[in-house]
Image (spheres, helix red, strand yellow):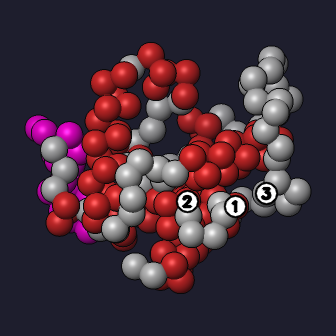
Amino acid sequence: MSWIQTYTAKQFFPLDARLDDIEIDDIAHGLSLQCRFNGHCRCFYSVAEHSVRVSHAVPTGHERWGLLHDAGEAYLSDLPRPIKQELPAFSEFEDRLLQIIAQRYSLPWPIPPEVLEADNRLLVTEARDLMGPPPASWGMEDVVPLAETIEPWSAAEAEQRFLARFRELGS
C-alpha cells in the first residue's frame, strides 16, 4: 500500500504527492492531532498550535510560511530532530512534499531563514514551558525564547485556530 487516506477521504501518496491532493483541512486536522516533542511534553501540545504560534513570531511577509512550515508532517508525520538528521532520505521526502505544498499555496521555495529562526524561538520557548528540566544542553543557548508563556490549546481549538489563521492570511 503506497497511499494513506486523509481526513477529507482523499487517497494521498505521501512519497509521490499530487498538487491537487493537498488540502488545508487535512493539514489542519492532521497537525492538530500530532503532539510536539514526540509526545514527551508535560501535556498535549499540537504541531498545529506550534505552527500558529510560529506564524505570529515571524517578520511581516513570512506569516503564511510560518503557518505551513510543518505542513508536510500532516502527511508524513514527524521524527525528532536527532533521528531526522540520521535519515537523509526522510528529509528528502519531507522537502519534496513541502515544495509541493509551497507550490499549492503560492509560497516561495525554500522556506525563508526568518521562518526557521522563529521555529527555533518557539522550540526553546516550548522547551521552557512544556518540558521538564533538561538533562543536558539542547545546544540552543543563543536562541532567545519568547516572553509569553505557552498555555496549550485542545486539539479541536488548535485545528480551528489554524484554519482561522490560514483564512486571515489569505488562502
Is residue 44 shown to the viewer in this render?
no
- Looking at the rendered structure, which numbered label has been put on residue 66? 2
Q: Amino acid at mark 3?
A: Ile
Decide: is 92 above or below 44.
above
Task: Return the residue nearer the eye: 114 or 97.
Answer: 114
Quadrant in which the N terminus appears: top left
Q: Residues within 10 Å of mark 3 (few under 14, many from 20)?
A: some
Q: Amino acid at mark 1?
A: Ala
Left or right of 19 in this view: 97: right
Asked whether residue 82 is drawn in magenta, I would say no
Q: Earlier in the sequence, mark 2 or mark 3?
A: 2
- Looking at the rendered structure, which numbered label has been put on residue 150? 3
Residue occupying the point 16% across, 44% down: 16
Label 2 to label 3: alpha-carbon separation: 17 Å
Label 1 to label 3: alpha-carbon separation: 13 Å
Residue occupying the point 55% across, 28% down: 81
Residue tagged 1:
57
Where disc 3 sits, the SS reads loop
* Segment tinted magenta in the rendering: 1-15
Quadrant in which the C terminus appears: bottom left
Q: Main secondary structure of the magenta part?
A: loop
- Marks 2/1 in contact by CB < 8 Å: the verdict is yes
